[in-house]
């Protein structure tokens, strides 16, 4: 499964021509990857991450996600898609993924290794 997370303006409006492509086995794995994109959310649970993001997008709406992690992740991504924040890509779409050890190398550099 592949998605494109659109960059946004300072007002939170999606920029259709800019973003980051991600690939995962399923919706739950994509949410875990998304959560790991910033040090501010990497330690959060997937549940807290999804509710936090949705709370910023729809602050006046009482949010409720399914209990099943995969179903919750699917609904989360669907809501992001409805707001134009993510785009679902075809499975055969080429995306240039960073090497898996990219963050490990950056951590080593920051630690002076």
Image (cartoon, rainbow, N blue to C red):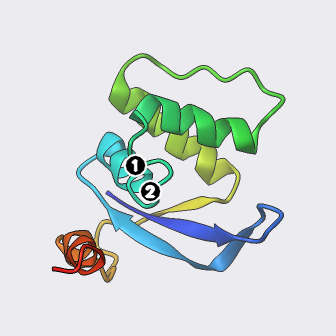
Q: Residue 43 versus residue 77: which sits nearer the camera?
A: 43
- Mark 2, Cα crowd under 10 Å, few <14 / some 14-19 / many 20+, is few
In what quadrant of the picture does the N terminus appear? bottom left
What mark, if any, has residue 42 been given in the picture? 1
Question: In the figure, 113 relative to 26: above or below?
Answer: below
Question: In the figure, 64 relative to 60: above or below?
Answer: above
Question: In the figure, 57 relative to 14: above or below?
Answer: above
Provide the residue designation for mark 2. Answer: 39
Q: Is residue 90 visible?
A: no
> Residue 20: horizontal and vertical position, in percent?
47, 73
Q: Is residue 28 visible?
A: yes
For numbered disc 2, what is the local secondary structure? loop
In what quadrant of the picture does the C terminus appear? bottom left
Quarter of the view holding residue 110: bottom left
Instruction: Describe residue 48's horizontal placement relative to residue 45 as left or right.
Output: right
Asked if labels 1 and 2 touch by Cβ distance under 8 angstroms, the answer is: yes
Residue at 35% over, 54% down: 33
Residue at 55% over, 43% down: 78
What mark, if any, has residue 82 been given in the picture? none
Q: Residue 15 versus residue 53: which sits nearer the camera?
A: 53
Instruction: Describe residue 17's horizontal placement relative to residue 60 as left or right.
Output: left
> Residue 81: horizontal and vertical position, in percent?
60, 52
For numbered disc 1, what is the local secondary structure? loop
Question: How far apart are the two marked residues, 2 and 1, measured between alpha carbons?
Answer: 5 Å
Residue at 76% over, 38% down: 58
> Residue 36: horizontal and vertical position, in percent?
38, 55
């Amino acid at each position: 499964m592949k998605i494109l997370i659109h960059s946004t303006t300072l007002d939170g409006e999606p920029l259709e021509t800019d973003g980051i492509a991600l690939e995962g086995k399923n919706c739950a794995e994509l949410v875990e990857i998304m959560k790991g994109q910033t040090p501010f959310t990497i330690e959060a649970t997937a549940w807290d991450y999804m509710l936090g993001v949705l709370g910023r997008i729809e602050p006046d709406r009482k949010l409720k996600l399914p209990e099943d992690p995969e179903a919750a992740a699917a609904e989360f991504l669907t809501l992001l898609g409805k707001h134009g924040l993510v785009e679902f890509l075809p499975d055969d779409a080429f995306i240039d993924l960073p090497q898996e050890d990219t963050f490990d190398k950056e951590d080593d550099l920051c630690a002076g290794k």
